[in-house]
Image (cartoon, helix red, strand yellow):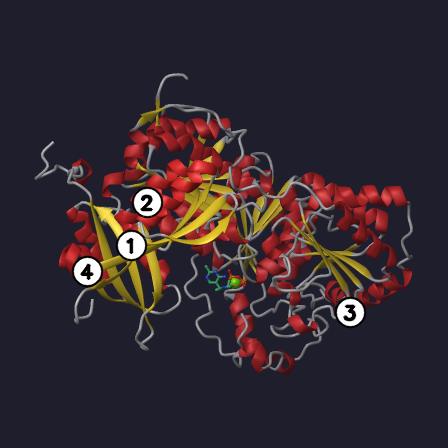
Amino acid sequence: MNKKNPASTYDIISINEDDERHTLSIIVDDEPGVLARVIGLFAARGFNIDSLTVSETESKQQLSRITLVTSGSPSVIEKIKVQVDRLVSVHKVSDLTADYGQYGALERELALIKVKGTGNKRLEALRLAEAFDAQTVDASLDSFIFQITGRTREIDRFINLMASVGLTEVSRTGVAALKRGADNT
Amino acid sequence: MGKKITGAEMVIQTLHDQGVDSVFGYPGGAVLPIYDAIFQQEDVKHILVRHEQGASHAAEGYARSTGKVGVLIVTSGPGATNAVTGLTDALLDSIPIVCISGQVPTHLIGTDAFQEADTVGITRACTKHNWLVKDIKDLPRIMHEAFYIARSGRPGPVLVDIPKDIQFAEGDYEDLSKTTHKTYTPPNTIDNKAVARVVDLMERAKRPIIYSGGGIINSGPKASKLLQKFVHKTNMPITSTLMGLGAYPGSGDNWLGMLGMHGTYEANMAMHDCDLMLCIGARFDDRITGKIDEFSPNSKKVHIDIDATSINKNVEVDISIIADCGKFLNEALKIMDKRSNKFQSFNEWWKQIELWKKVNCLSYKPNSDVIMPQYAIQRLYELTKNKDTYITTEVGQHQMWAAQFYKFDKPNRWLTSGGLGTMGYGFPAANGVQVAKPDALVIDIAGDASILMNIQELSTAVQYQLNTKIFILNNSYMGMVRQWQQLLHGNRISESYSDSLPDFVKLAEAYGATGIRVKKPADLDDAIARMIDTPGPVIFDCVVANLENCFPMIPSGKAHNDMLLGENVSDEEVANAIDDDGKIMV
Ligand SMILES: Cc1ncc(C[n+]2csc(CCOP(=O)(O)OP(=O)(O)O)c2C)c(N)n1
Ligand SMILES: [Mg+2]
């Protein structure tokens, strides 16, 4: 099949580019149904959502910030950005990953992690928590809840380690992100 | 596991395993593999409609008349969007249908490909549940889940969107028709103590009323039998919503007629004055309650519904039971048998009801020159009541007259668009019934405006030699709209005159059907007999009085005991019937 000039659209097959994770910061009007519009677009177009946070912004202009982590090939990411930007309620989309990179943007996430266990496992869990700078926010004779804040990858690592010392439940906030420096995101 | 089959073949195999004998559909690019599979088998009959809306209503008609799940197949994009009205109609009237839609191949989803629409997005609001199948492995499970969800609990429409590449893909099929669903588990038990408390209330009641609805029909014919037993045993008066007609016989002794906006005086007055209301399988819709804060002010209210979201939605009730209506009736009868007859005599109550009946609220001025629409329905009833008759309707005055004057003695015989009020529903629905019941007499009671909304389905009826009859009460107006304009807008008849109507007899003939026109009351009976005897589809153009209004009527925003009655109402009363608060209501 000729990829460049297919006989019909049915013959187009997706080109295998490697998927990338991108963090998008989307400023939207704070109005009823706006979140549904953004999420609906992802569902309709077959885009992925890895993590999502929504909240009001600092300003009094009735705006909300949706911070969304998505993954896809570079061309898909590009499509996502223009599609989201086209939504009437969306003011601005910035791709923190593409525009500012790891050092230009700050990304943080918070997770609560429950581990159950006694004896050595319990001690090991405490030691690991200390190493990762996680706080112990709840404790019983056979369980802990740790709170960890950090970059997504760091939290992933912590959770993976906890799996072997009695991890039972995880709750994550999703990513919060801002551009570094004085300029707005 | 056996040999691998394609997704398209799985679709047909599922229909077979679910006991579906007929489907309604329209082909297109994105469902060609399914149509190819249809071509190569004889188990499932495909009825080619002429518009996907027709397929959706035909599937509803098939479902409503048989109690089975109705199925339609549509192509992607415009095929799916055309089906949206029927899906919404089925959602509001709780009709189980499965819509199978084609979709562009998975890798093109999201690219605005030719005939791509976000079908799952569009239909999310008008289905009970919907699925986009992205992997052939999921197809057998999703197909069977679709049937399970459509018919279980409160029935409703579902949609399965199948990309074309999935229809071509091969995989293993397993008959999962006996399996249920991992998260969707509608109630199948009943709170016996609550039922006993209802029977307690019944024992103390002096002025009870049963207000039944479509839930009884959906529960199956057995629930209707139980309802009749229940009424017989208690001697309570019974009324029903538009959707519940036929569950208790329209010719039965305890029948008060339909309630609500165009319900009978006796039904609405009894609802208003009762001291105990048993709402079984109805939902306190605004057409029923009228002004909500004056709705049946002095009664204890009991609500039985399979859907918990219906409870306390519009009206706060004293006892609620979330269960199948048939199960409730069965349980209540058992308790009553054990306790053996401690009901009050309802003599005083019945005496009062008899007084209300004397008002004769359905009376109209007879006319020997012009056919009165009410008279036409009465004659149609008399001449068809001893046959195996199914009645569907369009929406408007004719629909209400049919509900008032045609007496239904059995469930599943009356098919109308209650919740959505969809003009264009009746004729395709009638075709759906006729496909399911080839030997029955199926009549769509229509209006001159409504029938034009899906008239193309006459071609379907001719192709399959369906005997469907279209009985048009032709008043040359969108009568119901005109009536509201008279009530609300100083009789300014804005755009509701049916100008340039086709010659319905010639129209029938153009399609290869038969047309009959009647203008004089004296000719009506013979003409109806001729319609019944004529094989194949018939358009019966019954030319009726132009400006007749449909009464009784509770004007919007008014209470049950504030009805406009027909015969003696003056034009001034009609013009002032609705106050400013009522005007904003629909
Ligand atoms: C699809 C649709 N469009 C508009 C309406 C609003 N509507 C309700 S009744 C009616 C008039 C129906 O006229 P006709 O079919 O002639 O019936 P009649 O009231 O004259 O018996 C209209 C326009 C509707 N119910 N459905
Ligand atoms: Mg009309």
Q: Are marks 1 and 3 in contact (CB under 8 Å)?
A: no
In this orientation, does residue B226 appear? yes
| Image point (37%, 48%), residue name | B120
In this figure, which residue is indicated by the disc labeled 1? A150
Q: Is B173 drawn above or below residue A170 in the view shown?
A: above
Quadrant (top left, top right, bottom left, bottom right) of the N terminus of chain B:
top left
Task: Between label 3 and label 2, give the one nearer the viewer.
Answer: 2
Of the two numbered discs 4 and 2 on the same chain, state the one appearing first in sequence. 4
Q: Residues within 10 Å of mark 3 (few under 14, many from 20)?
A: some
Residue B461 lies, in percent from the top left, at 46, 41
Residue B390 location, quadrant: top right
| Image point (60%, 78%), residue name | B578
Which amino acid type is shown beneath numbered disc 3? Asn
Marks 4 and 3, how far apart at CA:
66 Å
Q: Which residue is outermost to the top?
A: B2
Marks 4 and 1, how far apart at CA:
13 Å
Q: Are marks 4 and 1 in contact (CB under 8 Å)?
A: no
In this figure, which residue is indicated by the disc labeled 2? A158
Q: Are marks 3 and 2 on the same chain?
A: no
Q: Are marks 2 and 1 in contact (CB under 8 Å)?
A: yes
Q: Which mark is residue A77?
A: none
Task: Between label 4 and label 2, give the one nearer the viewer.
Answer: 2
Task: Between label 1 and label 3, give the one nearer the viewer.
Answer: 1
Q: Residues within 10 Å of mark 2 (few under 14, many from 20)?
A: some
In this figure, which residue is indicated by the disc labeled 4? A105
